[in-house]
Image (tube, helix red, strand yellow):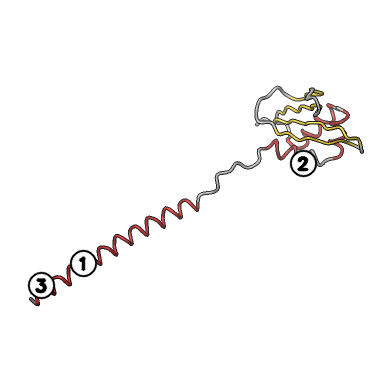
Amino acid sequence: MRRSLTSNSHKIAQAHLLDAIIASIILMLFTITSMAILSRPPSFTPHSPPDDVLAVLAQDPSFIKAVYSLDSESLSSHVKAVIGNRPFKLAIYNASNYELLLRIGSDIEGVASIVELSGCEGKVEPIIVSLVVGS
């Protein structure tokens, strides 16, 4: 009888050991998977170049004056000062009726960045500026 108690104790100990090993393996797999998911950089797209360029230009009072005066040479100079010799397409629209007022640059396609300007020199006149920058 004694022998069977010892044999049962060993079997119980083996079962507990096997449970602990399986639990450890599951815990390690969960930890490795969690770390792989959390260490991956977030899946977002940073602002594209047209957004950055237009954000800089829209803060420049001389660019805003060039937009409202529809000065294509000045506008082209402002854009090229920020992007260099990369191709671009800049379009200016009347915000109230979406009439195209001016388009300069190359005829390129891509994602446009858009900003609406509310006015210039105390005059309320909403204008939409659209910019596409090539690579």
Residue 12 position by quadrant: bottom left
Cα–Cα gap, marks 2 and 1? 69 Å
Cα–Cα gap, marks 3 and 2? 84 Å
Residue name at image x 55 percent, y 47 percent: 42
Q: Report which residue position mark 1 lands on.
A: 14
Residue name at image x 70 percent, y 35 percent: 50
Q: Report which residue position mark 3 lands on.
A: 4
Eyeballing the image, is 32 above or below 112? below
Residue 82 location (% of width, % of height): 76, 37
> Disc 3 or 1, which lies upstream in sequence?
3
The amino acid marked with disc number 3 is: Ser
Of circles 2 and 1, which is in front? 1
Residue 76 location (% of width, % of height): 80, 29
> Disc 2 or 1, which lies upstream in sequence?
1
Q: Which mark is residue 59?
A: none
The amino acid marked with disc number 2 is: Val
Residue 35 location (% of width, % of height): 46, 55
Asked which secondary structure carries label 2, the reply is helix
The crowd level at tag 1 (other Cα within 10 Å; few <14, some 14-19, many 20+) is few
Q: Is residue 90 left or right of residue 11?
A: right
